[in-house]
Image (cartoon, rainbow, N blue to C red):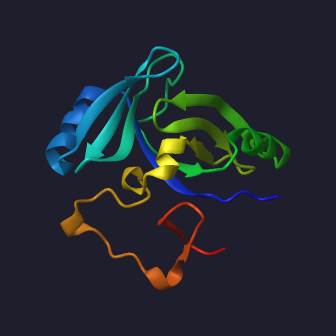
């Protein structure tokens, strides 16, 4: 059975989290809240206008040696454990096992059968219940936002958010 999937989380993976936070603070007006990952590493939640819009993860050697700074998109799934099993059986690979991000949800990094990297997230319950906290939108200021074409969307089962039809 296929899962409902949609873009949910945007994460900057960077070698210089301080410089990146300063850049996005100045250019987009974001503020940041530091949380601690289960492995003890810091993680920063990016906020704009009281809404969580993404996260910043600090790359470190030797684990991420040779990987350039990049933005990672996470697709929401209903059951991360099942999605990881389906990834493996469909010819993909789980490259970073499930990790809990406090207040955001459980994430994993996988590759598809062609080797393309993809993030998966099982959103925390509070993310599903409070549409004001969702990050399923572009990350620009409201005045600069691109109007979404509602005629192309169908309401999904998670509050007032939309996803493109299959």
Q: Is residue 34 left or right of residue 164?
A: left
Residue 131 rendering spot, x and y as whole percentages = 42, 56
Foreground residue, 117 or 157? 157
Q: Which residue lies furthest to the left in this view?
A: 26
Quarter of the C terminus within the rendering: bottom right
Residue at coordinates 55% horizontally, 60% vertically from top-left? 158
Q: In this view, does 59 lie to the left or right of 63?
A: left
From where the camera sits, is residue 16 visible? no
Residue 87 rendering spot, x and y as whole percentages = 76, 45
Q: Residue furthest right?
A: 89
Foreground residue, 101 or 74? 101
Q: Which residue lies furthest to the front in this view?
A: 129
Q: Quadrant of residue 43?
A: top left
Quarter of the N terminus within the rendering: bottom right
From where the camera sits, is residue 133 visible? yes
Residue at coordinates 52% horizontally, 50% vertically from top-left? 128
Q: Quadrant of residue 81?
A: top right
Residue 111 rendering spot, x and y as whole percentages = 67, 43
Foreground residue, 105 or 24? 105
Q: In this view, does 118 lie to the left or right of 94?
A: left
The correct choice, above or below, for 156 with respect to 7 in the image is below
The number of numbered discs placed on residues in the rendered structure image is: 0
Residue at coordinates 38% horizontally, 25% vertically from top-left? 35
Residue at coordinates 85% horizontally, 45% vertically from top-left? 89
Residue 65 rendering spot, x and y as whole percentages = 50, 23
């Amino acid at each position: 059975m296929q899962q409902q999937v949609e873009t949910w989380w945007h994460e900057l993976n960077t070698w210089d989290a301080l410089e990146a936070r300063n850049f996005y603070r100045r250019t987009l007006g974001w503020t940041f809240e530091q949380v601690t990952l289960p492995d003890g590493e810091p993680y920063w939640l990016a906020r704009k206008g009281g809404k969580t819009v993404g996260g910043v993860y600090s790359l470190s050697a030797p684990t991420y040696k040779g990987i350039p700074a990049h933005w990672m998109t996470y697709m929401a799934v209903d059951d991360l454990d099942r999605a990881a099993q389906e990834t493996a059986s469909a010819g993909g690979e789980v490259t970073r096992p499930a990790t809990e991000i406090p207040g955001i949800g459980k994430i994993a990094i996988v590759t598809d059968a062609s080797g393309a990297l993809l993030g998966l997230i099982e959103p925390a319950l509070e993310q599903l219940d409070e549409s004001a906290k969702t990050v399923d939108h572009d990350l620009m200021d409201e005045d600069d936002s691109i109007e979404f074409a509602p005629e192309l969307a169908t309401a999904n089962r998670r509050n007032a958010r939309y996803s493109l039809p299959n």
